[in-house]
Image (spheres, rainbow, N blue to C red):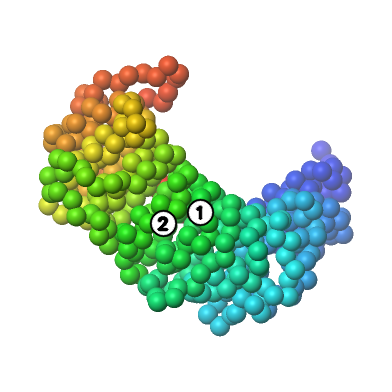
Amino acid sequence: MSAIGIGALPLELLGEVITHCSTSHWAAPLILGAVSRLLRDVAFRTPTSWRTLKLKEGDDPEKAHLWFSRSGACSIDLHIQLDGKDTPESLLAPILFPLHRIGSITLNVQTQLQASQALACMYHEPIALRTLRICATSQDALPVANPPTFPALSGITHLEVTNVVLSSLPGLDLRSLQSFCLAQPLVSSPISGDDVLALLHFAPGLRKLFIEARLTEPSAAEMNSDHEEEEEETLHLPELEALELRANNIIPVLDHLTVPSLTDLRIKDFDGRRAGASEELGASLHRLLVRMELGEGKIKNNDLHRLEVAGLSVDQTHEAWERCLRKMKRLQVLRFDSPADEVALTSLPPFQAPTTAAVPREIRAGFDFGFGYN
């Protein structure tokens, strides 16, 4: 069989190939366009291959203009790289961004100040932005007297932050937030548990929450040691479906949440070696399950389908865990991180099969993390 030249392939197929390559390397349309005139013509006529734009200090403004002109009506995923000596104004001011075309912004900066300056430089008035990622390399996000504020960006639905002062984030307008990822390197200063809870107050529609950080104990966590009567007002997140906590002081955070729609709970306790950690977590989880059943103002079964616990040795024979297992009537997946913690099927309460087909309970050791966050 004779080889088929690239010129014999349909132009639509070549466009799909270039678009696919652009998902692996943002500059694929330029790189492949340099191979031949044919590929250049196809790349410049395929708007979907220009959906990712990366800018850094020293880039010609024409680079951004090229991407926005060639991407047609497609939304742009904009990545901005700012080093310590860079000023956002010098990079962004010469560019006339069609802001309605930017679907997401990823800011890789040294400090939070650079991030807020970059957004303020681009957004002079509130315009909807769906996804925002801020990664500051500075290893200390310490509260300051006047932290840099972010412009009011309504419509944020997905937010990821690293090394950012949480108290400054509500300026973004988090009422539409559905997914929030908070990551803080372990070598950085701990994040205030109060700030985490305060931030969640501004995001009542949250559906996914991921936290990986060292946390200080919330000041409002001064409850009765036996927790027999909870007088503390909890934070009601009626839409939250997935929660992953990789942190210390997890129990005070859990004890402040009422999450009636939660189906996926994953925990890694950084303080799991402390005495009584298993019993304390089991008791806190039971309280959470009780609030889930009463969270809508009426008694119902909780909808927890998946529970994963790592960082501590779970004693499932303890009364607290036995009560949890009896309450988790719709549980499908239960995982602990140690072979010694592997749960036998016989130790589980009777499983009430749902009306529709469901995945059988998967009981095994091991722990895989989060909602696609790497």
- Where is mark 2, residue-wise? 199
Question: Closest to the observer: 286 or 247?
Answer: 286
For this rendering, which residue is in front, 52 or 111?
111
Image position of 163 with respect to 16: above or below: below
The relative height of residue 143 versus residue 26 in the rendered view (above or below) is below
Q: Residue furthest bottom?
A: 85
Residue type at mark 2? Leu
Residue located 57% across and 61% down the image: 152
Q: Is residue 272 left or right of residue 207?
A: left
Residue 30 shown left or right of residue 274 in the figure: right
Q: Which residue is mark 1?
A: 174
Q: Are marks 1 and 2 in contact (CB under 8 Å)?
A: yes
Instruction: Look at the image and tell me whether residue 306 can be seen.
Output: no
Q: Based on the displayed image, in which of its 4 quarters is residue 25 positioned?
A: bottom right
Residue 58: percent from left, percent from top:
68, 78
Where residue 316 appears, x then y in whole percent? 18, 36
Please report the residue visible at 59 percent of the width from the left and 80 percent of the height from the top. 86
Asked which quadrant contains residue 266, the reply is top left
Q: In the image, is 91 to the left or to the right of 184?
A: right
